[in-house]
Amino acid sequence: MNDGLYNPQAMVAESPSLAGVLYLSHGGGPMPLLGDPGHKNLLDFLKIVTPMLGKPSAILVVSAHWEARVPTITSGPMPALVYDYYGFPKESYQIRYPAAGNPVLAGKVFNLLASHGIAAKLDGQRGFDHGLFVPLKVMYPEADIPCVQLSLVDDLQPEGHIRIGKAIASLRKENVLIIGSGFSFHNLRAFFDPPTAETQALNQAFEGWLIDTCSNRQLTEAERERRLVDWQQAPAARYCHPREEHLLPLHVCYGAAQTAAGRVFEFSVLGKMASAYLWQ
């Protein structure tokens, strides 16, 4: 297991005129912010990757923790935080991340989706869930970059989420950082079961497939997209993702980038192998 930058092949330089696209594994609830030792490598990753991104003019986050009938976009000027986790210490419900919203950007996202034939909805009341505020509190602690959050669609269809990513891809030209906030391994029961050689092999098999799928430049983009659409056929797919909501932000990211990831990061979270992917 590599706890730093994983470089499976020589990376090809990508366009400096485009803002980055980042799929990250955000860890367990608020635990990265509570000093949990099982999240140290994740915190290290978030601190390493941030300087690579520069300072975007705004951030659009697709969170695994929000599903709606159609893609829904936070459009309020100052969204509150949604503490969408349970059973954690009192201080985890006192976390603050006072980033402003961006109603103008929300409207652009809405219009881009509509122009691609995707029905969408603006939500002026919904706040930022921990898929946004936990990683961003580490990455941009000043909370001085306006943020917009975009939901998943509750049908959880991979093709549709890639299509959403393609629809919003042009935002990168406006220095909007697109983040898919999920987790490349999300079997909650497995986090609490004692690890075995078999379960570690299952975890590693899926991670190896995912890394190859996202970063192998020998694949055509049609092949890469087909793999992501058919992700359930990957080794140990349903062991690592009994439900796919934490994987699908990656599909949105790929749709926005439509190329191999330029950088791949591997790290351990709560004893499980996880990964993150950067296009820039």
Image: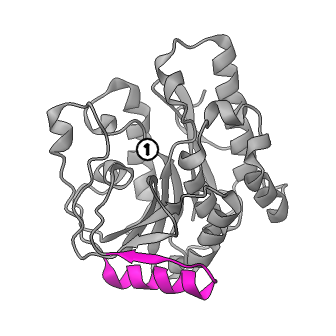
Judge by depth and name the residue closer to the eye, 215 or 93.
Answer: 93
Q: What stretch is highlighted in magenta?
A: 102-123
Does the magenta segment cover residue 120? yes
Placement of 108 over or under 277, stated as above or below:
below
On screen, residue 80 versus residue 64, left or right, reads left
Placement of 178 over or under 6, stated as above or below:
below
On screen, residue 247 versus residue 82, left or right, reads right
Q: Position of residue 15 (x, y in %)?
A: 61, 73
Q: Position of residue 128 (x, y in %)?
A: 31, 59
Q: Which residue is drawn at 24% across and 70% down?
A: 100
On screen, residue 179 versus residue 204, left or right, reads left
Picture quadrant where residue 225 is located: bottom right
Placement of 262 over or under 108, stated as above or below:
above
Q: Where is residue 98 in the image (x, y as percent from the top left)?
A: 19, 62
Q: Is mark 1 on a helix, strand or loop?
A: loop
**Quadrant position of the C terminus in the picture:** bottom right
Q: Can residue 33 be seen in this view?
A: yes
Amino acid at dot 1: His
Q: Which residue is drawn at 46% across and 19% down?
A: 192
Residue ID for mark 1: 26
Q: Position of residue 194 (x, y in %)?
A: 52, 11
Picture quadrant where residue 206 is located: top right
Q: Which residue is drawn at 31% across and 27% down?
A: 36
